Amino acid sequence: MLSHQSIQLYYVDTLPSEQRLANVETILAPLSVDLQLQKITSKVTQKWLKSVDDNSVLIDEVGDVFVIAAGMKVSPNWQSLQQRVVKAGKKTELLLKAMQLQANMTVIDATAGFGHDSLILASTGASVTLLEQQPLMFLLLQLEQQKMAQQRNWQKLMSRLTIYHGDAIELLARLPKVDRVYLDPMFPADSYKSAVNKHMQMLHTVTTPPSIAQSQQLLSAALAQITPQGVVVVKRPKSAPFLADKSPNLSLSNDIVRFDNYLNRI
């Protein structure tokens, strides 16, 4: 069961900002969220960003939406991934080598976050369902999909993405079985040898790493959700222990991350 949450939202005194606010309220209306609104008239500066609480939302003067954390404003910014999406392949993306996707396959990304990995998965022609428990992240994903769907060259890719809000374990039990389930559960920031980017920093302010029991439940739910020939793929820092301490059937890694593959038969 998801708990009731409150989100502090700041918006600028402009027409685009107020129009976007109406869009935000529509998306959040079905969720258990109290939206605390505050109009700002001063310029959004670095000093101002540092003065507000983490996980606040900002709608700027042109209607773009950001989450604020650690003095930064962050958005999914799918546009920045265009070249990576276009060039994505098994030779350039270890993720795709691990997933072994074909165009007619179905995938659930049960830990969607900013949706960056989901975009790469959908670039193969597969249909990807994104699950996100945090209302704040769900809001950003919905807004980003709407925004990118307005661009002709992104429309086919956007049509292959479906976004749901809720607890991943509960949603997995209700959705149709799929060819692949992808898991990238939160892990302590100090588990990564290299500095994490601002998107990862923000995620660490919104979510906490799952307990062993939660990890076991998530992996079990994912394995129950795949077809007989399906695979669950788990992304981990290279040196991290296996999810739920369960050994995979296969692992692929580079200097930074590792993908652990679990087959349906285990």
Image: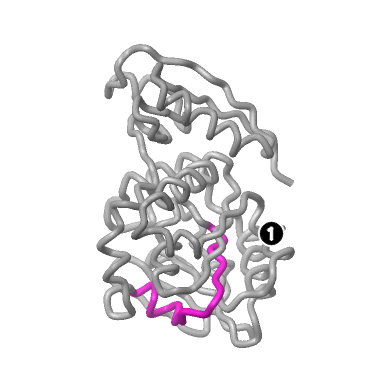
Residue 99 falls in image quadrant: bottom left
Q: Report x, y in % for residue 43.
A: 30, 17
Judged from this view, the residue extending furthest toward the top is 41
Q: Report x, y in % for residue 101.
A: 46, 80
Q: Which residue is mark 1?
A: 171
Describe the element under mark 1 as helix, strand or loop: helix
Magenta stretch, residue numbers:
94-111
Q: Is residue 93 above or below residue 25?
A: below
Q: Quadrant of the C terminus?
A: bottom right
Q: Report x, y in % for residue 171.
A: 69, 59
Q: Is residue 75 above or below residue 254?
A: above
- Magenta segment: does it hold 225? no
Give the residue drawn at x 49%, y 17%: 38
Residue 218 falls in image quadrant: bottom right
| Apparent side of residue 17 relative to residue 110 in the rendered image (left or right) | left
Q: Is residue 111 above or below residue 220?
A: above
Residue 130 falls in image quadrant: bottom right
Give the residue drawn at x 38%, y 42%: 75
Mark 1, Cα crowd under 10 Å, few <14 / some 14-19 / many 20+, is some
Is residue 247 at all visible to an observer of this figure? no
